[in-house]
Image: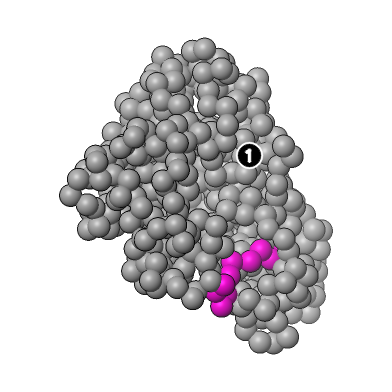
Amino acid sequence: MPKRTTLYEKHLAAGGKMVEFAGYDMPVQYPLGVIGEHMAVRSAAGLFDVSHMGEVVISGAGAMAALQTLLTNDMEGLAQGACRYSPMCNEEGGVVDDLIVYRLGQEKFLLVVNASNREKDVAWMKKWLPEEAVLEDISDDVAELALQGPKAEEILAAVTKGGKAALPGKNYTFLEGVEVAKVQCLVSRTGYTGEDGFEIYCKAAAAPAVWDAVMEAGKGAGLVPCGLGARDTLRLEAGMPLYGHEMDEAITPYEAGLGMFVKPDAKNFTGKAALVGKNPPARRRTAIKVTGRGIAREGCEVYRNGEKVGVVTSGTQLPFVGWPGAMALLDMDAREEGTVLEVDVRGRMVAAEVVKAPFYKRDK
Amino acid sequence: MNIPKELKYTKTHEWVQDTGEGTLRIGLTDYAQHELGDLVFVNLPSEGDGLTAGLAFADVESVKAVSDIYSPVTGTVVAVNEVLLDDPALINSDPYDAWLCVAGDVGETEELLSAEEYEALLAKEG
């Protein structure tokens, strides 16, 4: 029996089509559909229930040491009130998970991890945790909502005590104790859609009140509820990798195009030894545009002049740009922009070419 | 759910219309398009291609997945709705107008359901 978030009844009331994902019953889409939801986020705003995501707090005198050991990115300079993305590697240099660190205090950090990896992550982190660090998995007590799109700030400000001034202003910063619909929330200026927006964390039981207030405030601005389907198409169009697709235990951060989040010169971390000499990698995440008729999906093999040069890791029709795109792990010499490729779409060879990532970038 | 009385249906959610000229028009039901979601690509057979009852003859793709469409009859493709190649979303907006192909030389036919029987099938599938 899959778990339910505290917003389950809201999803049913809004006509959400529920599917099991990472052990949760989650809305994949609402009656508007994936494309409509996707476009609403690009032009107005969308509200997502992402309460299935995992939240782990690491605190204590050894907390920073724990993060520095576990994560490939350098957390030393991370200011209180700021967020930082990082892969977490295994000893072979593959990716255990990718996550976002929030610095809550001098010795206290919140880590937001992928829902499907939560239990694995907690076990992995505990294995490497120094004695002076304490780990607490608070996932079941915390709800997370993502409000994304150009109208997100205006909508959230309308239901936040103190309005716009009470919200985090800069990208990848956050504030605690933000009062949204009379609920105490941690609000960060982060997201997974390529748009401006916020991620809102609160006590699980209080999430329905926040959901209702935000939906009501967004009525006139074009806000729609969005499911996992649009979450996936939005992140893909914005060129963002997804765990289990662009990276996994057998794919290094360098191969996943995440080299800028790996800091071997700054510190020691798990997997560092295995990553020596792996940058540049032999293959790397690459954006491709399907120019022929068809849609490249995960697992489709990619060819150049009849020779296999890689495999698709995610692909679909990109709703905003209006053509099919994909991310693929391609041999380094086959990923120059404009390289003509063919993708084996279930036995049919379909023309494609290497393009610059991301497929979509918002005007700032 | 829209289930026109004058059409016949398959258990795999295709509709079949007798054109009255010895051929059959084939499409996807309203239920099917609703379950599939926004369609973004359709792969159709060509005129002259053979059809085999119960085997896939076309496929449609939503943003999330690809799905095969099964032929209700054995026969030959005599017409293809090429408008769908450029605008697969027509299947979502008007599934009973957006036919996929017309079958001629019709031989063996899958078990076809009346509108009432198809409605009962959907009720069972929930």
Report the colour scheme: one colour
> Can residue A294 be seen from the camera position used here?
yes
Three-letter amino acid code of the residue under disc 1: Glu
Tell me the residue at 29%/44% (across/down).
Answer: A63
B29 versus B25 height, above or below: above
Coordinates of residue A90 in the picture (x, y in percent) = 35, 65
Asked if the stretch drawn in magenta spans residue A282, the answer is yes
Instruction: Reply yes or no: does residue A47 show up in magenta.
Output: no
- Element on which disc 1 rests: loop
* Along the viewing direction, whichever of B85 and A109 lies nearer the viewer: A109
Taking the spot 58% from the left edge, 50% from the top edge, the residue there is: A235
The residue depicted at 74 percent of the width and 79 percent of the height is B49
Horizontal side of A122 relative to A239 (left or right) equals: left
Name the residue nearer the viewer: B89 or A287.
A287
- Residue, far left: A131
Magenta highlight range: A280-289
Q: Is residue A300 visible?
A: no
Which x, y percent locates residue B110? 56, 70
- B71 and B8: which one is in front? B71
Looking at the picture, does residue A8 appear above or below residue A254? Answer: above
Furthest toward the bottom, the residue is A306
Query: For this view, does A143 lie left or right of residue A230?
Result: left
* Residue occupied by mark 1: A195
